[in-house]
Image (cartoon, helix red, strand yellow):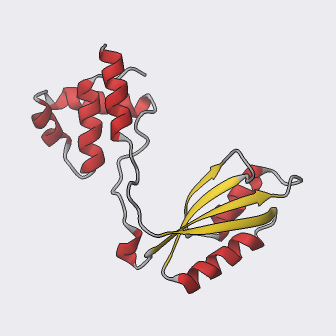
Amino acid sequence: MRIDRLDAELIRMLTESPQLPILECARRLGIARGTATSRLARLHEGGVIEAIVPRIDPSGFGYGVVAFCLVEIDQKVGHDDVAGALADAVPEIVDMHTVTGASDMQLRLVARDATQLQEVLDRVALVPGVARTASSIAMRTHLSGRVLPLVAHVATDEAG
């Protein structure tokens, strides 16, 4: 889908402030409310925007530990089956990806502390189809959820 600089700016505004009213977005962009609304609808329908939601900081709920878990899956079990079982069994998983390399999946999960992290990792390991796991704890997050540079790059490429 082609996006232009106005689309990119609308995405930037709503990424930074999801609660921003469409009328305020239109005012900042210097366009009519109807134009902003139709652009937003086009971005939704085109699959560029999945949803406009607040960005939650898990530490605000007391989940101050972020960890990554590499999962090797028993080859007799499908990835989708394991992914569904993990999602159901472990609500502390916030991202889950099928990956290439020595492991089959990578999870990002949160916990309140090291003790709870161990409990979470134990639940991951007990899911049917999980053969092995390896985990690491994030000491500090330097960058998370970076979408805007990509949007700006695509808008620049499309304009040129």
Visible in this render: residue 114? yes
Q: Residue at x 48, y 80 (%)?
A: 112
Which quadrant of the structure image shows residue 152?
A: top left
Residue 157: percent from left, percent from top: 35, 19
Disc tally is 0
Is 53 displayed left or right of 67 in the figure?
Answer: left
3 over 115 or under it: above or below:
above
Is 57 displayed left or right of 67 in the figure?
Answer: left
72 vs 9, nearest the viewer: 72
Residue at the farthest right position:
76
160 vs 51, nearest the viewer: 160
Is 98 displayed left or right of 147 in the figure?
Answer: right
Q: Residue at x 79, y 57 (%)?
A: 73
Visible in this render: residue 41? no
Q: Quadrant of the N terminus?
A: top left
Residue 151: percent from left, percent from top: 35, 33
Residue 97: percent from left, percent from top: 62, 50
140 over 53 or under it: above or below:
below
